[in-house]
Image: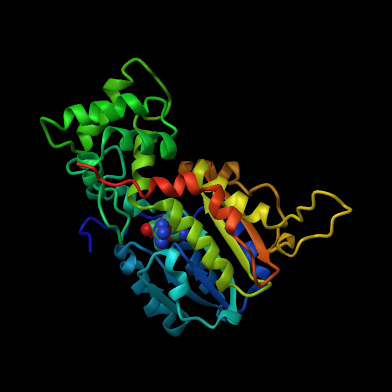
Amino acid sequence: MSATIKLENKHFPVLLKELISIISPLYGGTFLDCTFGQGGYSKKILEKKINKVIAIDRDQDVYLYAKELEKKYNNRFHFQNIKFSEINRIEIKSNDLKAIIFDLGYSINQIKDLNRGLSFKSKGKLNMKMGINNFSCHEVISNMSETNLYKIFKYYGDEKYSKKIARKIVETRKTKIINTEDLIKIVDSTKRFKYSKINNSTKIFQALRIFVNKEISELINGLINAFYLIPVGGIIAVVTFHSIEDKIVKFFFKNYSEIKNSSRYVPIREDNIRCFNLQNKKPITPSSEEIKLNPPSRSAKLRFAVKIKNECNFEEFINKFKELTDIEDLQFDK
Ligand SMILES: C[S@@+](CC[C@H](N)C(=O)[O-])C[C@H]1O[C@@H](n2cnc3c(N)ncnc32)[C@H](O)[C@@H]1O
């Protein structure tokens, strides 16, 4: 367990009131919290004595918070250290499950843990691992070819200077091991005269975090598994923080909520029958009060839907984002 975890690093659960009001009509059952973090959502659900929570997180550092809840709520709360792409492994009485929730992104502990190298204040060896990873950012920066680095920056960061930055990384690593400060310097020097409100390295850090943690396939498989785990009538709710995540979640709910019938004279095909009931087409976003209290919440979007059918063909969903999941298969070529 990381020694840098401090209980005073309190995570503000984003859109908590809104999320609880969405799942509250269904109170009295089991809820699956796929991104436990400091347990902000889990705690709120457990306040009602009739509820049970199963929580998971890929980061084993959150045991500290999970243990507190296990002690307080005994058999109403269970925690597992797994990734949400693996929720199909959870032994659960599916019929009791009322909602599955995802609060994507990073907890304040992970951001403030400078050893993880997720923030621009980090120093030393590049890391960026959220937990249960196959490799770290250090291996990516040290071993990926210029072309592969370029693809990661372009597809996962939409970084305009992807090519120049990739070239500079490959040039620099011939003479030294690139650490977190070096990476920031490389990006700054590439964008020397490009002033912007956001940190120069924001997009490069986002791209590397997504790659190291395989966030795209995690989300796609997590959503599909959630569909098969939740019974008809149950809710899937997701809070996203960046545009790639939101595009995936929006497509998942919207595409499978609409009846796509090209002509009213053609009979509706079996696989065109809706899988979800989508009440809000637009995402729910934080109020100005919440943003004032917790500025990072400004990019949060909450989308949710009710499952209305047992089977669904997700081929179109998987194919739609194949270009992004293919990037995860890029090999270290040095
Ligand atoms: C924004 S925090 C959640 C905060 C939480 N809702 C709260 O109120 O404290 C996101 C958490 O999700 C976890 N996480 C991210 N991706 C995951 C994945 N694929 N599987 C399991 N946990 C994941 C992170 O480790 C992090 O602890």
Q: Is residue 260 above or below residue 196?
A: below
Q: Is residue 100 above or below residue 177?
A: below
Q: Is residue 253 above or below residue 306?
A: above
Residue 255 in the figure: left or right of residue 190: right
- State the residue in front, 292 or 238: 238
Most extreme residue toward the right, as rendered? 265
Q: Is residue 247 above or below residue 159?
A: below
* Residue 116 percent across, percent down from the top left: 26, 49
- State the residue in front, 41 or 251: 251
Please state, as top left, top right, bottom left or bottom right, where the N terminus lies in the image: bottom left
Most extreme residue toward the left, as rendered? 175
* Residue 81 percent across, percent down from the top left: 35, 69
Q: Residue at x 45, y 51 (%)?
A: 216
The picture quadrant for ligand 1 comes to bottom left
The image quadrant of residue 318 is: bottom right
Residue 111 in the figure: left or right of residue 36: left
Please state, as top left, top right, bottom left or bottom right, where the C terminus lies in the image: top left
According to the image, what is the colour scheme of the structure?
rainbow
* Residue 329 percent across, percent down from the top left: 36, 50
Q: Residue at x 59, y 72 (%)?
A: 230
- State the residue in front, 168 or 236: 168
Q: Residue at x 37, y 68 (%)?
A: 82
The image quadrant of residue 118 is: top left
Residue 150 in the figure: left or right of residue 92: left
* Residue 215 percent across, percent down from the top left: 42, 52
Most extreme residue toward the top, as rendered? 193
| Residue 293 in sight from this viewpoint | no
